[in-house]
Amino acid sequence: MSDIAAALALPSWILPALVLWPVLGALGVALGGRAPVAADPLAADVAVGAGTADDAGLRDGARVRAADARRGFADARNLAAAVLIGEALLSVLLWLGFEPGATTWQMRFDLPWIPQWGASITLGVDGLSLVMVAMTGLLMPLAVLGSWRNVGERAVSYHALLLLVTAGTMGVFLALDLLLFYVSWELVLIPMYFMIGMSGARGAERSRASLQYFLMATLGSLLMLVAIVATWAAVGGRGFGLDTLLAAHAALSAKAQVWLFLAFFLALATKSAFFPVHSWLPGAQGAAPTSAAVVLGIKVGTYGMLRFAVPLFPAAVLNPVLRTTVVGLAVVGIIYGALVALVQPDLRRVASYASVSHLGFVVLGIFALTAESLQGAMLVMVSHGVSIGALFLLAGMLEDRTGSTAIDGFGGLARGVPLFAALLVLAALSTMGLPGTNGFVGEFLVLLGAFRTFPGATVLATVGVILAAVYLLRALQRLLFETPRPDGVQPPARDLDARELGVMAAFAVAIVWLGVAPGPLLRRMEGPVQRLVSEVHRTSALFSPGPSDVPFTPTPMGGAQQ
């Protein structure tokens, strides 16, 4: 791979291209896209064949579509899919051009932004950000292609916003400047609010879900903004760059680090749906269109913990009381999420509470702060995006055909739609962490690494692994193999089509590949993880266990140093 990386010699512009390309695509979709006339072409065929009043409406729709084509308009889904395929190619190019053994930021891009504040557009990639960029870049086009008939209402605006969310997500993973990180963070939150509210489930459900998401995410992000400004001020306003702030630990007392870390952690934990600030996630993923539900499963919050909160505030991360409290909440979240998933009547909500449970493993791995646990936490984040993404796409495909994802409403689906059933079983097995699938390696490394630091909590966390098998196998049994209910939902008349099968085949390959051969990811994460562990322990030793006497006096905004 090093020979490939040397041959490619990627320029630094590839990182801003990963952020700007979806923004340009969003503009193109907004200006040149049109909504599909019928969300499901099979439903349109039925309406036309029946000779109902819908017949004239569909013919009118065809005339509108033809007029739009003459004016140069294209289906918003086609445009969005094309842009996201381009984004996936850029992500693959970045993966191939990355040098695994390098110890510095690669393809770093610097551009002055607000010089009087020391803010700059600084992007960089290491092994931690690389795996998240690659996962996101490959996941997004699959999410659109796998939910092709799921968005009919305001499809143009929806797909433009989805591209903006993609740009913000890439910015979160690549930003090395705290202010830029915050802007990217907001570029994820705000469009997602509109995506849920205008294109999600009908009625009060989507309004309630989008409002709860917005209020909780906004409260957290405002606290994080205050913490960012306070951190910047504490180092004399020299800049928002991660390297600049890491070199100024002495400017923050241990007590100040605890308060600033709590502000960061609350924002990041809320966005990740960490227990007990998780209540928005099941409603949002239940009301959101399928592709938006998949995006909500990408763990930008826990990545922010690893990239910024942990290295910037080492005294807080290793504070015994705070650390034990967070680990305790992680274990409670693992078990709570699994128990609640066990009684959910809807496949989407089972996947949502599985997400809450799995997040506990990520946070446990982060705060155990060993090389194995951190690598495991990163693998759980990547595997979670794959497994939960597959579950939501399959749930969306079932909903497109039947209008329902109620587990008790079906039964015996394995006979009528065997391809769907087989892939649902594979996605569920990967979610429960079956050996040989992607879910196993990450959870095993988390438990292995965390046992050194928190043996009791680790033993309790294994209960979540057992419960995951219980609630997922129970859902599979009721959906796929029980006798259909006479008063139940009419089963689908058709199995997966070629497009859907191609999308899910890509997920199947990822599930098996990450489970059998995770070495390429582990090698790229090894160096950054070891540096993070050693740096946190080294810098935390500079602070006494009690409150430090180093003053914490913010510098006025106008007093920033150049």
Image: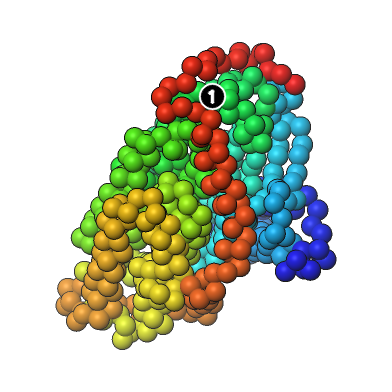
Nearer to the camera, 198 or 463: 463
The quadrant of the rendering that contains the C terminus is: top right
Nearer to the camera, 444 or 152: 444
> In this rendering, would 119 be left or right of 429?
right
Image position, residue 415 (x, y; %): 31, 86
Residue at image location 50% in from the left, 28% down from the top = 543
Q: Label 1's element?
A: loop
Residue holding disc 1:
252
> In this rendering, would 231 be left or right of 438?
right
Amino acid type of the residue that numbered disc 1 sits on in the rendered structure: Leu
> In which quadrant of the rendered view does residue 494 lie?
bottom left
Report the residue that reaches farthest toward the left. 486
Nearer to the camera, 358 or 91: 358
Residue 242 seen in the figure:
yes
Q: Residues within 10 Å of mark 1 (few under 14, many from 20)?
A: many
Image position, residue 203 (x, y; %): 32, 48
Residue at image location 76% in from the left, 39% down from the top = 110
> In which quadrant of the rendered view does residue 351 lie?
bottom left
Residue at image location 32% in from the left, 54% down from the top = 455
Q: Is residue 296 above or below residue 410?
A: above
The quadrant of the rendering that contains the N terminus is: bottom right
Residue at image location 61% in from the left, 51% down from the top = 528
Image position, residue 208 (x, y; %): 33, 42
